[in-house]
Amino acid sequence: MIGVILYGPPAAGKDTVTSALNGLDPRFTLFRRLKAGSGRTTGYRVTDTEHIAGLRVRDEIVWENARYGSLYVVDRPGLLQALESGVPVVHLGQLAAVTAVKSALTQARWLVVSLSCSRQTAIQRIRERKTGDDEARIRAWDETEELHNADIAIDTDYLDPQESASLIAAEINRRLLAA
């Protein structure tokens, strides 16, 4: 079992690179985190806080964070299912989340990719999304810590999504052949 962690601040290109990866090879699929709250639902498994509380009681939460008025969860059952059916691409924006996901399922191997872009580019991308929460997303961009120990670091100001996807896919394939 192998998966990809795309780490980075809002607007660094996680959705775009994931889409390019899936276009390159359908085994790469977005790991849809659980989400309880309002706002965008695309790319999430929408749930409620009661369901998340049940997961918490059963110790099935790998990582959770609250942002933009919603609760986002990486759940162990969902992650295991995604690893068994393909190469999940997990989007994360907190350093502790990377450690939590890598430690959650010791039988899985992870390729950790750090995506970045300039603040100016992020602001432009955030505004183009028209989600209505620009200031919160820019603040989240400012608060996202740099990941120093990534397997691959990509600046999406300079590498386009297809080039990024090709680089990631080549490394996954190299690791699968080496296993």
Image: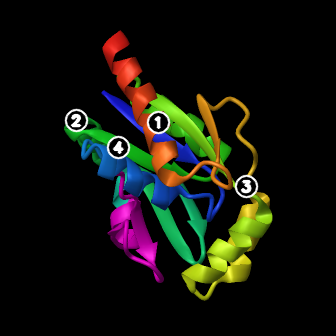
Crowding around mark 3 (Cα neighbors within 10 Å: few <14, some 14 to 19, many 20+) is some
* Residue at 37% from the left image edge and 11% from the top image edge: 178
* Residue at 52% from the left image edge and 56% from the top image edge: 14
Camera-near label (4 vs 1) is: 1
Q: Are marks 3 and 2 in contact (CB under 8 Å)?
A: no
For label 4, the residue is: 88
Camera-near label (1 vs 3) is: 1
For label 1, the residue is: 168
Instruction: Please report whichever mark, 3 or 2, sits nearer to the chain's N-terminal start.
Output: 2
Q: Nearer the viewer, residue 54 or 130?
A: 130
Instruction: Please report whichever mark, 3 or 4, sits nearer to the chain's N-terminal start.
Output: 4
Left or right side of 154 for 22: left
Whole-number angstrom distance, CA of label 1 to CA of label 2: 19 Å
Q: Amino acid at mark 1?
A: Ile
- Read off the magenta span: 30-53
Whole-number angstrom distance, CA of label 3 to CA of label 2: 30 Å
Quadrant showing the N terminus: top left
Q: Looking at the picture, does residue 103 appear above or below residue 100?
A: above
Whole-number angstrom distance, CA of label 4 to CA of label 2: 9 Å
Residue 84: assigned label: 2
- Is-magenta flag for residue 37? yes
Left or right side of 157 for 107: left
For label 3, the residue is: 144
Q: Looking at the picture, does residue 11 appear above or below residue 134?
A: above
Q: Are marks 4 and 1 in contact (CB under 8 Å)?
A: no
Instruction: Please report whichever mark, 1 or 3, sits nearer to the chain's N-terminal start.
Output: 3
Q: Are marks 1 and 3 in contact (CB under 8 Å)?
A: no
Mark 1 falls on what kind of element? Answer: helix
Q: Position of residue 37 (x, y in %)?
A: 46, 78
Mark 3 falls on what kind of element? Answer: loop
Asked if residue 87 can be seen in this view, the reply is: yes
